[in-house]
Amino acid sequence: MDKQFSGNNKEEVKSLISPEKLKKILDNAYDEIFVYDNNYDVVYVNRACERHYGMKAEAIIGKNFYELEDDENWYPSVLPMVYKKKRRMTIEQKSYLGQTLITTAVPVFDDDENIEFVVMSVRDTLPDIALIRNEFEKNQDNLRKKKSKKLERDEIEIVSDKIIHKSDSMKELISFTNRVSKVDSTIMILGESGAGKGILAKYIHSMSKRCDKSILTLNCAAIPEDLLESELFGYSKGAFTGADYGGKVGLLELADKGTLFLDEIGELSPRLQAKLLHVIQDKQFIPIGSKEIKSVDIRIITATNRDLLELIEQKQFREDLYYRLNVVEIDIPPLRERPDDIIALSNYFINKFNKKYERTCSISKECMNFFIRYHWPGNVRQLMNAVERLVVTSIKPTIEINDLPKVFFRKLESDNRYFPESYASAKESFEKDLVIKAFKRFKTTRKVSEALKISQSKASYLKRRYCPSE
């Protein structure tokens, strides 16, 4: 017969829900539960915080509210308002990872009517709610449709230029980037393919004094040399066979007063390297087929994943141009060296693609641990692609390791530096499986302790940890 609960006996409650069971229940709640004490310190938060802020619960518990607020994990804040009003409050917030959150904060009073704790429940708006809101906004007016393409593009860039990061190395990089963005020197961004060099270039532009002008991008490896030259410098009417009749304005002229981002600069031919050096030194250029000298005021940002110093030794890249372009150097560390950023970015992309495809997917703890151990040769671009694919193809709302494409495991097996499971994780999995089987067979802690040759207190601890419902 099932155990009946009257609700009148405190000892009965304690026997039914132990602290370990209660924590397990709260940790598995979909909505985020946040508890602050009267010093504004976090005394508890469940695992849903990872989905909202890209941080593990252990990294948040013990931190002060103002420390978390300074890191822009959410906006606006509700905690100070609760202390001021001394009543329950509900607000809409934006999370660091771009989610819209509905947060209800409830004060808990002590016997003297002073606030002892504040308990918050935080819910991310579901796709169907977002769709209803979007329909409502569309029906209000058509002003958004009448905006110019430039404004629409700028709005998209403001969103995409947000550098999602939680690691110390990226915090230092962003702090340095913020300083050098204010001056007008050339910047060279280094990093592996997919590390986010283009996003960082746009971020630099958005933080610079040229932010009200355009940033134009040209990939030096994407098009042939002759076409690259005409794209960069433009050409006059009738400059060559096949040219547009009216001529063409080049990116150098279009980027005047703004920023020009030259990606894959190591692929630029020696002839175009010489022409670019002239532009940087004299701030002037002549379009193809023209005699008119044009003056420009532009900031040049470049990026490469190649070793330019080695190319200089091989006489494939001009040393004088290198030093002109490399007044400031920013080296983006690969994603595999930034586990905290893997967590933040994974949850950011989950939120992004949940909205796009109207899903409510989340990443399991085991799958996230796999992401942290994986070496990500394609860096952030590969992670984004992987998460989008998983959101689209997963059948269940929780994404597990076995949902990953087989290519992930093939790459791990072929690289001796990486292994799909850590020693601690494998040990814990074995222990959990062994304990569950033991309690199913022997039932009591005394018999389990005898079978496993451990103390009865250790058996009791393992039961609370792995078999709380037994």
Image (cartoon, grey):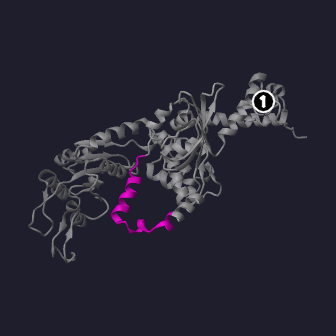
**Which sits in the foreground, 281 or 27?**
27
The answer to which of 159 and 442 lies nearer the viewer is: 159
Quadrant in the rendering for residue 5: top right
Seen as rendered, the residue at the extreme right is 1
Q: Main secondary structure of the magenta part?
A: helix
Residue 285 placement, left or right of 101: left
Q: Which residues are magenta?
A: 137-163
Left or right of 198 on screen, residue 353: right
Q: Is residue 449 above or below residue 282?
A: above
Q: Secondary structure at mark 1?
A: helix
Residue 332 in the magenta stretch? The answer is no
Q: Nearer the viewer, residue 270 or 415?
A: 270
In which quadrant will I find the N terminus? top right
How packed mark 1 is, by other alpha carbons closer than 10 Å (few <14, some 14-19, many 20 or more), is: few
User: Does the segment drawn in magenta span residue 147?
Assistant: yes
One can see residue 307 in this view: no
Q: Is residue 316 left or right of residue 148?
A: left
> Circle 1 sits on which residue?
14
Residue 407 place in picture, x, y as percent: 54, 53
Left or right, residue 132 beside residue 265? right
For image coordinates 53% across by 30% down, the residue present is 40
Quadrant location, the C terminus? top right
Give percent across and percent down for residue 207.
31, 47
Q: Is residue 436 above or below residue 265?
A: above
Please tell me which residue is depicted at 52% across the width and 60% down the height of the picture: 356
Image coords of residue 231 (percent x, y): 24, 65
Q: Position of residue 321 (x, y in %)?
A: 18, 49
Q: How many marks?
A: 1
- The residue drawn where x is 33% and y is 63% is 150
Q: Quadrant of residue 222?
A: bottom left
Amino acid at the residue labelled 1: Lys
